Amino acid sequence: MEHLVIRADASTQIGTGHFMRCLALAQAWKDIGSKITFITTCTQESLLQRIRDEGCDLKTIAQNYPAPGDWNCTKDTLATNPNAWLVLDGYHFDEAYQQQVKSAGSRLLVIDDIAHLKHYYADIVLNQNLCAEQMHYSCEPYTHLLLGTRYVLLRREFLAWKDWERKIPKIARRVLVTLGGSDPENHTLKVIEALQNVDIPGLEATAVIGASNPNASTLEYAATQSRIPFRLVHDAKNMPELMAWADVAVSGGGTSAWELLFMEMPTLFLMLANNQQHIVEYIESQELGKNLGQAEDISSTLLTEAITSFAKDLNRRATISQRTRQVVDGQGIHRATRSMQKPETDELKLRPATPEDSRLLWELANDPAVRASSFSTEIIPWEDHLNWLKMKVSEPGHKHYIIIQSDSGSPIGQVRFDSLGDKAEIHVSIASHFHGHGYGSQAISIASKQLLKETEIKRIYANIRPDNISSIRAFANAGFRTDGTVKIVEGHKAVQMVLDKDEGAFESDPF
């Protein structure tokens, strides 16, 4: 197994999220038997000790890029390990840094959240956020995109809880507060103050603060003055246990959000930074948590009301808890490391759609996300759906498949081909609660390969709304290209993307 070099930082200003998810990657790499070097400007001894405890070589540097010492240290480390992978996690690593890595002949994984660069030169770009597939990445032809929560990087201590199931009490009485590794604005104190006024008998709370939190003494005093039982935990090493203990959480929208989803936690989310807005808003839109808005804009009084209401809303908490593990399944770290060793194999299968799938197909067709991205956004009545399906089944060029997960057999979407002559139009839809897993491009790829191998079809094409960036990206990842054709479909402009059999594109596996 190749040497892994990680370049990531942690501080009061940037928090600990970049550092901790790279720690998860280091753990996984160590578990498959290889050497890791961690390069960082972090000065928090407790965090540095966690790297040493994993058996990693540790190199600390005084200033981060664009200070010349940053790249010089990375370059020298790569020079002594010519077959190494380099992992970059931080917004300050720009296009020039990536180009220097590639010019040095090393393989590069960039962990990203916001697609903020004009171009990416990495071999792999990993964005573990729910809305990652909707982002546009300008990148090299060789770049492999790992987008969505199926690539969430969870540390080893969380993976031990993969078979645990949360119990949802009628009223939530145990509250976990975790607002990042630094929380320089001390929003944790505001939550502590809000909890003092929550009128729920038996309420108790635990707040976790990181090693770089500058307000520790203030919070320690607040904990001693609390009218409810209150624990303040510094630099917790047992986060899964604390999450399992709690009934609800108040959290930021950073790395801890995915840990909470994995632990099936009903959570109230506060936006602690601008780059968390799209994450938290999408979490609420998918019924995976409640968005309380920007942390600086919410008062202690409103926090009290929100916590009280959430703690008493059994149905909402139960719904959230049931959905979360479907989104973060704990396999992301393994998918990421497999992709670094070799491209992923397909994890989806197809089966022919049958009359027994009528309701499944109808519910999928009326999924709000599917309707919103369709050329016709109107809800489809049940009788209209049955008539349409009966008509389609009788058409000789019609092929219809249900997409299922290989391991569980659960249906997640559908693929349909309508053929005329040697051309076929493809239609794909994935249920909204499976969005962000990269399933769209996999489904397109395996279905297209099957059609091209089993029939005389020479071209597959898709008509896509220009504003449907996630679909355009999914088709591009599956080998389709834009042919420059702009059509009008049901009164809307459509971009046409094609896959030609004689180009051999279907023979390659983009995963």
Image: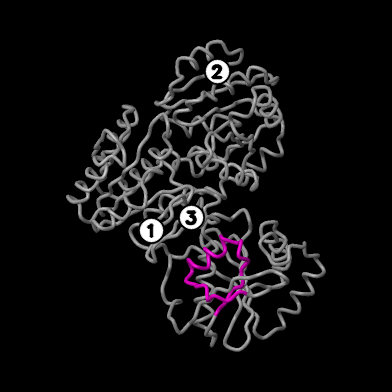
Q: Is residue 466 magenta?
A: yes
For the residue labelled by badge 3, is the local secondary structure a helix, a strand or a loop?
strand
Residue 89 located left or right of residue 444: left
Q: In 3D space, how far apart are the residues under numbered discs 3 and 2 (Cα atoms)?
A: 38 Å
Q: Which residue is mark 1?
A: 339
Q: What residue does disc 3 label?
A: 147
Determine if the magenta segment contains residue 215.
no
Residue 300, compared with residue 314, is above or below; it is above
Quarter of the C terminus within the rendering? bottom left
Number of other residues with Cα within 10 Å of mark 2, as a class: few under 14, some 14 to 19, many 20 or more: many
Packing grade of label 3 (10 A; few <14, some 14-19, many >=20) is many
The mark nearer the N terminus, 3 or 2, is 3
Q: Which secondary structure lies at badge 1?
A: helix
- Please, what secondary structure does the residue beneath circle 2 have? strand
Query: What amino acid does circle 2 point to?
Result: Phe
Q: Earlier in the sequence, mark 3 or mark 1?
A: 3
Towards the viewer: 450 or 293? 293
